[in-house]
Image (cartoon, rainbow, N blue to C red):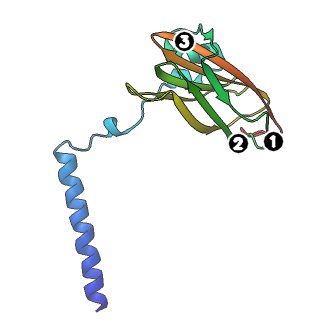
């Protein structure tokens, strides 16, 4: 009975491995198409303007009331600060930056055609500062800021 169980597990594993090998060999699973794009220069930039420039090609943004940020006034734990960004514009991308982080760019989201301009996530903040949302719409960059006070730093502080 135990031998039958081990045999079944072995056969299931062999079939799964074989199917995966066939899929890889046929080009059905290509790692580049599954992995997210990584903009090393933007995510390693030390200044907000440098991060926006490396990510979106131009560091200049226009402040807009059409971009709303929902974030707590006081974040008790900087390791998990909930952020929601919404816009009524036909957004191509939404990026979030924490101005006083060592590396300010926390995340960027590329939205498909017809997608609603809305994202909700959690970011890390090392200390008190502005959260900046940058929305790319119609080839232009729009932004909004919200100050968040951090009582316990989330980036090693």
Earlier along the polypeptide chain: callout 3 or callout 2? 2
The answer to whether 66 appears left or right of 15 in the picture is right
CA distance for labels 3 and 2: 28 Å
Q: What percent of the width, then of the height, locates residue 14?
A: 23, 67
- Residue of label 1: 152
Q: What percent of the width, then of the height, locates residue 67?
A: 61, 20
Confirm or deny contact between disc 2 and disc 1 (CB under 8 A). Answer: yes
Residue at point 47%, 29% (across, down) = 116
Camera-side residue: 63 or 45? 63
Q: Closer to the observer: label 3 or label 2?
A: 3
- Residue of label 3: 141
Q: For label 2, count other residues whose C-alpha is less than 10 Å away and answer few (under 14), some (14-19) or many (20+).
A: some
Residue at point 49%, 29% (across, down) = 109
Residue 104 visible in the shown view: no
Whether residue 78 is situated above or below residue 4 in the rendered picture: above
- Residue of label 2: 79
Element on which disc 2 rests: loop
Q: What percent of the width, then of the height, locates residue 105?
A: 60, 26
């Amino acid at each position: 009975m135990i031998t039958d169980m081990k045999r079944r597990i072995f056969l299931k594993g062999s079939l799964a491995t074989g199917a995966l090998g066939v899929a890889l060999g046929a080009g059905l699973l290509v790692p580049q198409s599954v992995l997210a794009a990584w903009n090393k220069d933007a995510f390693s930039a030390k200044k907000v303007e440098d991060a926006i420039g490396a990510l979106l090609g131009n560091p200049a943004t226009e402040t807009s009331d059409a971009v709303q940020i929902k974030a707590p006034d006081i974040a008790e734990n900087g390791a998990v600060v909930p952020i929601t960004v919404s816009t009524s514009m036909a957004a191509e991308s939404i990026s979030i930056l924490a101005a006083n982080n060592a590396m300010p760019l926390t995340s960027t989201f590329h939205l498909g055609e017809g997608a609603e301009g809305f994202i909700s996530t959690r970011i890390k903040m090392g200390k008190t500062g502005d959260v900046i949302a940058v929305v790319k719409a119609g080839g232009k960059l729009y932004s909004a800021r919200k100050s968040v006070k951090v009582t316990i730093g989330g980036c090693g502080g």
